[in-house]
Image (cartoon, coloured by chain):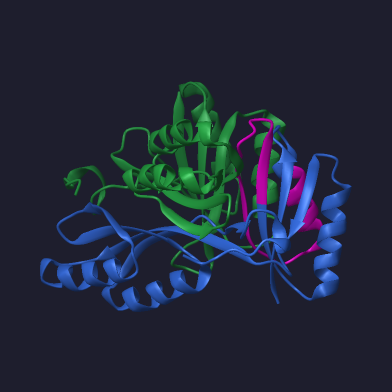
Chain colours: A blue, B green
Amino acid sequence: MRNIISALVLNKAGVLARIAGMFAARGFNIDSLVVGRTEDTKLSRMTIVAIGDDKVLEQIRKQLDKVIDVVKICDFADMNYVERDLMLCRVHTPPEKRSEVVEVVNLFRGRVVDVARESLLIELSGPEQKMEAFVDLIRPYGISELARTGVLAMQRGAQAKRRRAAKP
Amino acid sequence: MRNIISALVLNKAGVLARIAGMFAARGFNIDSLVVGRTEDTKLSRMTIVAIGDDKVLEQIRKQLDKVIDVVKICDFADMNYVERDLMLCRVHTPPEKRSEVVEVVNLFRGRVVDVARESLLIELSGPEQKMEAFVDLIRPYGISELARTGVLAMQRGAQAKRRRAAKP
């Protein structure tokens, strides 16, 4: 089971090391871990995608709760949420294949951020499944470089489950 | 000075903990650190934005080089590169302000990913400066939540400096 947990942590040296060390020591299966800035310069938001059953997730939550630099934990398990991942991907594209590749990029609402004689550098963001569908379609052309950030998640609607939100 | 270093590392448990621990122990000033998947399931790509002079950066490079799980290091200092960061941001938007906010989002080529009665959830990707310009413009409306992934970078052109690439 794939689960997303996000934690607000203090933005200070050593916090990432402490949490990553804790995960490594316990052998948790972490699919992705992102730490980035928030609206408050004193806080960072860590988003963790963990694979495991309810027991493992409960353990991760408890272990995170013990770290004094963790301010707040949010588990997206029974929430309606938006997830996004960012990818940069260099695709082998000889001139005669360019329009084909660009068409796929447009269909996925991606962006071409750099053009070279024999390659395109593509930026794409979206949920996990979209990224994977894109990579599957583009792989036959030849992917020479690919980098992903890992998942960022946020709850839908203004204040949790009480308020209903519309998908635009 | 702000510098971007990327490292291909083995995709196994404990690598992030080791590298984050090394940075914390040495007290390096890391602005952002992203680890994500690559085209090869055995490798992850780590992108580090470090603040410091040439000496500090040289030290970071050397320290990374010592970690046996690091396969390859790339320093973007004298390269032509593309950088991207992803942000999810919830903005307080009463109905009468909605069109104003949506206009700003469109100008920045962002996307509205969720609509609630009093807020919009916005997705935006781009280089550092663009993100900051957007946040400055949107802050007066009231940002209730903001999360960023940190920077992902890739060299322009097909094979480094020899080949010239065009900005589309």
User: Is residue A36 part of the magenta span, yes or no?
Assistant: yes
- What residue is drawn where x is 84% and y is 45%? A67
In the rendered image, which quarter is residue A75 located in? Answer: bottom right
- Please give left or right for residue A58 compared with residue B51 in the image: right
Whether residue B99 is situated above or below residue A126 in the rendered picture: above
Whether residue A33 is situated above or below residue A93 in the rendered picture: above
Which residues lie in the magenta part? A17-46
User: Is residue A14 part of the magenta span, yes or no?
Assistant: no
In the rendered image, which quarter is residue A108 located in? Answer: bottom left
- Please give left or right for residue A36 compared with residue A142 in the image: right
Residue B37 rendering spot, x and y as whole percentages: 51, 62
- What residue is drawn where x is 53% and y is 45%? B93
Residue B44 in view of the camera: no
- What residue is drawn where x is 33% and y is 62%? A110
Residue B59 rendering spot, x and y as whole percentages: 55, 29
In the rendered image, the residue lying farthest to the left is A96
Residue B4 rendering spot, x and y as whole percentages: 45, 37
Residue A41 rendering spot, x and y as whole percentages: 63, 30
Residue B82 in view of the camera: yes
Name the foreground residue: B73 vs B17. B17
